[in-house]
Structure formats: C-alpha cells, structure tokens
Amino acid sequence: NAGVMQNPRHLVRRRGQEARLRCSPMKGHSHVYWYRQLPEEGLKFMVYLQKENIIDESGMPKERFSAEFPKEGPSILRIQQVVRGDSAAYFCASSAQANTEAFFGQGTRLTVV
Amino acid sequence: TQLLEQSPQFLSIQEGENLTVYCNSSSVFSSLQWYRQEPGEGPVLLVTVVTGGEVKKLKRLTFQFGDARKDSSLHITAAQPGDTGLYLCAGVLNTGNQFYFGTGTSLTVIP
C-alpha cells in the first residue's frame, strides 16, 4: 500500500546544473500536482498534470522549469541551470480524480550551492 | 494575494487546553482539506469536507465547513504534545484545477 514516492529525498546541485525530481503517484492515481515550499512559508502551486498532459502550469516559471508525466514511469520536474533561489522543498501530490483529495509525498529538498 | 487566510499564524498552548484554527476566504470552494505537516515531512491529509455546514470528527479533532463553503475551522480538544505541527487548509475552487493552500498555523503544545 505504497503512498506517493518521491526521490531523491535530498538533492544538492551546483549553480548551473540540472535538477531532476521524480514522483511516483499512488497506485491508481493519474493526477499529479507539484508544489514548492520555502522555509516558514506555505505551499505554492506549480503544475498539475494528468497522464501525458499538462493541465495547468500557471504556477511554474516560464524559463528553466518543465514537468512531464509520461504514460509509463514517474512524473518528472526538471529544473535547468539551477540558481540559489531554486533551493526549496518540492512536494508532489496525487489524486484518483481531478481535484479530489490529494495525498502528498515526503518531498525532495533541493539545495543549490 | 492569498486565497485562503489562516489564523492564528502561530499558537503555543499547554497540554490539555483546547484550541481553534480558522481558514477563511472570500471565494467559494467545492471542497476543502486539512493537512498536518511535521518538519522535514510532507503534508498528511487529515480530512476532506465537501458539503456546506458539514462537521467531521477525528478523535479529538473537529472540522467544520462553513455554510457558504467559504471558510472552515479545526477545533482540537485537550491538546497533546503529539498534536504539534503545521496545520494547513487547502481548497479547490468550483472552476479550478489546483489546490490552494492556506498560510498555515504552526501549533506547539507544551507538555
């Protein structure tokens, strides 16, 4: 009865490198949401995907950030040419149907040095 | 602009006391969720409310959805140190594609 799985839990990247964050939704869930959380702040929506489709990316920066949820395999959040300001906890959530209750993974903590 | 405002932002109480956390908005939500998050972990879903006026109980926690589906409250009876954490409300708009999160309430229960 695995929940939402995110890996890696911790990721350190030098400025200018690429960061790839993976999210495997709960079994039977085809809706995935990515959120970003800075220390002492709430969760900020980034992108909502349903298998092979981006439904809403209004919270994702237009440059350097991209997300995908292929037919097979986990959802990937990719950050190219990382900068120090990208350092944050990135959370993935999944739901069985659109906008029904969502379950979160344990997050990936990205540190850019 | 924050769609969901939570109050208080910080709360420190003694074990055994009661407390209420509020989640308010001027928007109408089709559903609202409450989560609890501990440091270094992801938010854990506590409850989902979908009907205006709905009340749900989870042991010592009581959740209420406002009649107009614009606000919600979380009441904890006889708080325990294990209740310590960040409490987040999140709502889905009728026409939305995302869960909007509240500003969060950081609760500390002192033994």
Image (spheres, helix red, strand yellow):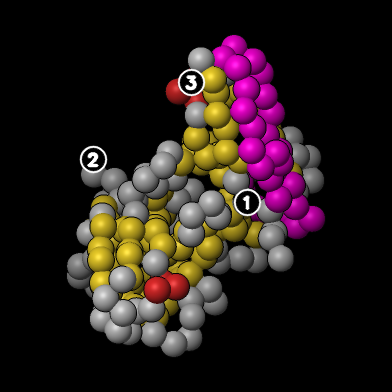
Q: Nearer the viewer, residue B11 or B74?
A: B11
**Residue A86 in sight from this viewpoint:** yes
Instruction: Name the spot of residue B34 as percent of width and height, x first.
Output: 56, 41
**Residue B59 in sight from this viewpoint:** no
| Amino acid type, residue under disc 2 in the picture | Asn
Residue at x-position 46% and y-position 41%: B37
Residue at x-position 79% and y-position 46%: B68
> Which label sits in the foreground, 3 or 2?
3
Res. B99 image quadrant = bottom right
Chain of the residue that carries numbered disc 1 in the rendered image: B
| Amino acid type, residue under disc 3 in the picture | Pro
Instruction: Name the spot of residue A17 as percent of width and height, x first.
Output: 26, 81
Q: Which mark is residue B81?
A: 3
Q: Is residue B18 left or right of residue A70?
A: right
Magenta stretch bounds? B5-32
* CA gap, disc 3 and disc 1: 22 Å
* First in residue order: circle 3 vs circle 1: 3
| Amino acid type, residue under disc 1 in the picture | Thr
Q: Is residue A35 left or right of residue B87?
A: left
Q: Which mark is residue A1?
A: 2
Task: From the image, tell me which residue sits under label 1.
Answer: B103
Q: Which mark is residue A58?
A: none
Chain of the residue that carries numbered disc 2 in the rendered image: A
> Which label sits in the foreground, 1 or 2?
1
Secondary structure state at the residue bearing disc 2: loop
Q: Is residue B13 part of the magenta span, yes or no?
A: yes
Disc 2 residue crowd, few under 14, some 14–19, many 20+, Cα 10 Å: few
Name the quadrant of the N terminus of chain A.
top left
